Image (spheres, rainbow, N blue to C red):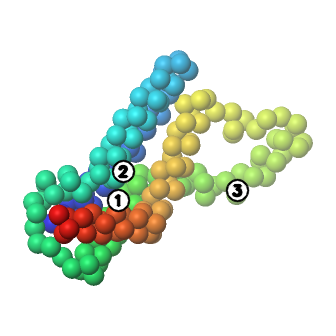
Amino acid sequence: MQIVAKVVLVIFGIDAVVRLYRTLVLLGGELTILNYLLMFVLLTVFAGLLVYFLIFNSNRLAVKMAGIGEQLTQPELSKWIICSMRIGFIFYGFLLLCDSAGFIAKVLLVPFRIRMLFNEIVIYKSFPKMLELSIREWLVLIYDFIKTVLGIYLLFGAPGFVIWQLKRSIIYSERQCNE
């Protein structure tokens, strides 16, 4: 149960960071540059604290949520961590990609618009009107790109993160056994 609690905490941590920055992006057009930078710094500090407590330091919180539970052998622990994290990440990756469907459609239309962009740049010698976006529109575009890349990474099961978390969990369980 601790492993499942840890996976839930990690997914909640990722979701909280994604939602915090979405809020920041939506406020982008309404704030002055100085207020926006201040808001960005504050949200980054808050997101860093969330990441620290829900992803990096989730072992203690998982024990508090699920209780001590049974002690698994090293191979069983590894199998449970890998399977539960991959299932959770793939599920959340699908959610992120469903939310990014509009952005993905825009990206897929880029090859059809290249000729129009090329004509505006070369023939008319002007900056393409398609790329004349407000700061808020650029922020939304960057946010959607990062969210889509994160969704694709999670859809593949976040292999690098799962291996890193597996190593941390094994070290933590060894410490608990030695105490």
Q: Is residue 137 above or below residue 167?
A: above
Residue labelled with disc 1: 92
Residue labelled with disc 2: 14
Q: Which mark is residue 112?
A: 3
Disc 2 crowd, CA 10 A, few/some/many (<14, 14-19, 20+): many
Whole-number angstrom distance, CA of label 1 to CA of label 3: 31 Å
x then y, percent, for residue 58: 26, 54
Whole-number angstrom distance, CA of label 3 to CA of label 2: 34 Å
The answer to the question of whether label 1 and label 2 lie on touching residues, with beta carbons closer than 8 A, is yes
Q: Is residue 56 above or below residue 50?
A: below
Return the disc, 1 or 2, that comes first in the chain's sequence. 2
Q: Is residue 13 above or below residue 36?
A: below
Return the disc, 3 or 2, that comes first in the chain's sequence. 2
x then y, percent, for residue 19: 37, 41
Q: Secondary structure at mark 1?
A: helix
Front disc: 1 or 2: 2
**Residue 85 in view in this figure:** no
Return the disc, 1 or 3, that comes first in the chain's sequence. 1
Quadrant containing the C terminus is: bottom left
Front disc: 1 or 3: 1
**Residue type at numbered disc 1:** Tyr
Residue at 48% x, 62% y is: 152
Residue at 29% x, 46% y is: 53
